[in-house]
């Protein structure tokens, strides 16, 4: 009997009883903001891939963003940035979390970011809202480029700031 | 037996988490590549001659077109860009010196003739080397449509200062007025291009 119960427990765990909610690519976006000695700018990506596992609460989330889709409004700058972060080798920046806490409308993701072939644990605090059959998650966090890149991208021989602010607005269809 | 069975199930437990992570990413990532093609759709004619699909370097087998070589070309492109930027600073500095010296020389100070000629050589060397590096470097990853005022302005100004630099050398001894006009045009458009710059 005990054996059957244990077996059942693991089978249930293996099976998908939760639902997967896909990201609304039209509404969702991710921005990065960076500074340089000569100026500062913001790049936006409106083509994010994401999914969350939801069973009344968000239990898992996976996001994949293609770096080539970031647009700062200056094609020359974007190209230089893409080439310096070796996008042929590492085309995506990914985020995954399955340690998710919800307190009121504040949601905390303890997860892992993968960028330029390196993975780092990260804690992201965001705001969670339900708007018209969609779950909206909005927030921002800081990223240190030196934790992922051997060489910080440079323009006119001056490097950009190590600290990059990433802000996001994600919509998942219920 | 029961213990072994339990051990097996416990061992499989973390694999479940990993497989779920992988499955979620498999669901959302349909294309593992940064771009669908190794070469951009559009590139300069000078780049196409050497680095295009049927370019000289491809046909001779010196740089066959494949993923690994394109990564190496990107690395080379970054080194060329760095060198180009150093040359741009050097050119700009030399141009400023040339404006000062040239102005004094054409105002009647003939003792500055040799200095003027030397700086002229330096400006030409750094400017045209930088231009050559730009024209013959490996093509970028993708061809992004020239976007943003700065990019467009830089492109427009580049055309003017390149033409003016050639004219400055062509009308050197024949027509001092034209030479001065071309030189000032080259300097002012080059300075403007540096200010609006590539970003």
Image (cartoon, grey):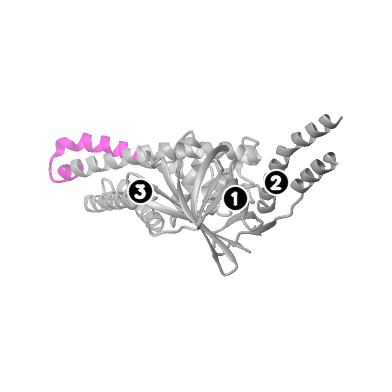
Residue A62 within the segment the image draws in magenta: no
Task: Return the residue nearer the eye: B139 or A144.
Answer: A144
State which mark lies toward you, 1 or 3: 1
Which residue reaches farthest front? A1
Q: Are marks 2 and 1 on the same chain?
A: no
Rounded to the nearest whole Å, what is the CA distance between mark 2 and mark 3?
63 Å
State the quadrant of the N terminus of chain B: top right
- Kind of element beneath mark 3: helix
Q: Which mark is residue A153?
A: none
Q: Position of residue A101 (x, y in %)?
A: 55, 49
Q: Chain of mark 3?
A: B
Residue B117 within the segment the image draws in magenta: yes
Q: Chain of mark 2?
A: B
Q: Position of residue B73 (x, y in %)?
A: 56, 38
Task: Return the residue nearer the eye: A80 or A105.
Answer: A105
Rounded to the nearest whole Å, what is the CA distance between mark 1 and mark 3?
49 Å
Decide if residue B152 is on the left or right side of residue A38: right
State which mark lies toward you, 2 or 1: 2
Are there few (<14), some (14-19), or many (20+) residues within 10 Å of tag 3? some
What residue did someone put label 2 on? Answer: B20
Q: Chain of mark 1?
A: A
Q: Residue at x 83, y 30 (%)?
A: B4
What residue did someone put label 3 on? Answer: B166
Q: Main secondary structure of the magenta part?
A: helix
How many numbered circles are shown?
3
Visible residue check, residue A168 = no
What residue did someone put label 1 on? Answer: A64
């Amino acid at each position: 009997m005990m054996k059957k119960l244990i077996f059942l427990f693991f089978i249930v765990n293996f099976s998908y009883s939760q639902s997967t909610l896909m990201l609304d690519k039209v509404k969702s976006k991710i921005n990065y903001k960076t500074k340089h000695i000569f100026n500062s700018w913001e790049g936006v990506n409106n083509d994010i891939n994401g999914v969350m596992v939801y069973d009344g609460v968000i239990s898992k989330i996976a996001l994949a963003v293609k770096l080539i889709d970031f647009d700062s409004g200056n094609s020359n700058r974007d190209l230089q940035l893409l080439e310096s972060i070796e996008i042929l080798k590492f085309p995506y920046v990914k985020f995954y979390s399955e340690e998710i806490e919800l307190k009121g409308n504040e949601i905390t993701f303890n997860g892992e970011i993968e960028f330029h072939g390196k993975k780092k644990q990260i804690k992201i605090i965001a705001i969670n809202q339900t708007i018209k059959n969609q779950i909206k998650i909005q927030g921002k966090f800081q990223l240190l480029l030196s934790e992922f890149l051997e060489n910080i991208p440079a323009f006119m021989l001056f490097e950009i700031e190590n600290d990059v602010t990433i802000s996001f607005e994600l919509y998942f269809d219920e | 037996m029961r213990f072994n069975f339990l051990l097996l199930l416990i061992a499989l437990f973390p694999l479940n988490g990993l497989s779920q992570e992988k499955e979620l990413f498999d669901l959302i990532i349909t294309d593992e590549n940064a771009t669908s093609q190794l070469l951009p759709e559009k590139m300069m004619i000078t780049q196409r001659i050497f680095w295009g699909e049927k370019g000289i370097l491809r046909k001779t087998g010196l740089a066959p077109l494949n993923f690994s070589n394109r990564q190496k070309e990107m690395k080379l492109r970054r080194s060329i860009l760095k060198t180009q930027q150093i040359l741009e600073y050097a050119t700009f500095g030399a141009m400023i010196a040339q404006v000062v010296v040239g102005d004094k020389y054409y105002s009647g100070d003939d003792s500055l003739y040799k200095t003027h000629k030397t700086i002229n050589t330096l400006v030409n060397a750094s400017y045209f080397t930088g231009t050559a590096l730009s024209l013959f470097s490996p093509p970028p990853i993708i061809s992004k449509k020239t976007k943003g005022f700065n990019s467009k302005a830089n492109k427009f100004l580049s055309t003017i200062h390149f033409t003016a630099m050639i004219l400055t050398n062509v009308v050197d001894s024949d027509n001092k007025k034209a030479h001065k006009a071309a030189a000032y045009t080259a300097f002012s458009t080059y300075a403007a291009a540096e200010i609006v710059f590539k970003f």
